[in-house]
Image (tube, grey):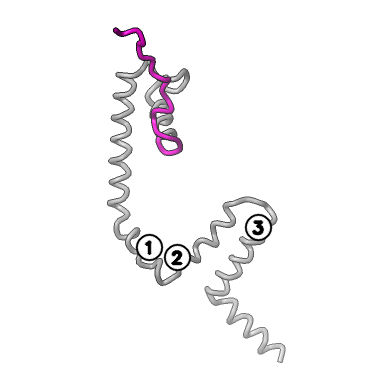
Amino acid sequence: GVMSGLEGLKIAGGSSRVHYEALQVVFAAAAAICDYPLFTAYALLDICGWKGSRTVMDAIYFNFGKMMQTMLLGLLAMYLWMVLGIMLLKDLHREDECNNLFQCFMSYLFQSIRDNGVSEMLEDAVFPTDIA
């Protein structure tokens, strides 16, 4: 009776699927109580177990080194673009946007990912209107 029920709970408690489902409930409750979005990200791990997503996960896993090389190449190109921007367009940058290389790099990175590109960092160009 009671002993066999406890043994059943002990066997079920040792299952990784039970632990996974318990963590799903704990993180969902924590997300509802704390209103912190990171707790809801745990539920996205469920997508990794789908048959269709396995191919995508394998493609990411096997090509991770190549993707990191591509990211570094992109950062290098952005760094070179930023150095050219500092050298050629220093007087066109908005105030407190590009005072040193690090600040300029972080501003360029932030603006290029988040907004409409680096043109948001520059003041509007003034062209002469009295050319005959």
Residue in the image at 42% along x and 38% along y:
113
Q: Which mark is residue 30?
A: 3
Percent x, y for residue 104? 40, 26
Residue positioned most to the right = 2
Amino acid at circle 2: Cys
Question: Which numbered dot is residue 48?
Answer: 2
Distance from the alpha carbon under mark 3 to that under mark 1: 27 Å
Is 20 rendered above or below residue 107? below
Quadrant of the rendering where the C terminus is positioned: top left
**Secondary structure of the residue carrying numbered label 3:** helix
Q: Are marks 2 and 1 in contact (CB under 8 Å)?
A: yes
Q: Residue at x 28, y 30 (%)?
A: 80
Q: Position of residue 70 (x, y in %)?
A: 29, 46
The majority secondary structure of the magenta stretch comes to: loop
Task: Please name which of the two marks, 2 or 3, marks the residue nearer to the observer.
Answer: 2
Tell me the quadrant of the picture where the N terminus can be found: bottom right
Amino acid type at circle 3 is Ala
Q: Are marks 2 and 3 in contact (CB under 8 Å)?
A: no
Name the kind of residue labelled 1 in the image.
Met
Q: CA distance from mark 2 to mark 3?
A: 22 Å
Helix, strand or loop status at disc 1: helix
User: Of the residues tagged 3 and 1, which is closer to the observer?
Assistant: 1
Find the magenta span and give its range.
112-132
**Looking at the image, is mark 2 or mark 3 earlier in the sequence?**
3
Where is residue 24, by image quadrant?
bottom right
Q: Earlier in the sequence, mark 2 or mark 1?
A: 2
- Residue 119 on the magenta segment: yes
Q: Which residue lies under the disc numbered 1?
A: 57
Residue 85 spot, x, y in % from top left: 32, 23
Q: Is residue 99 above or below residue 110?
A: above
Q: Is residue 2 left or right of residue 113?
A: right
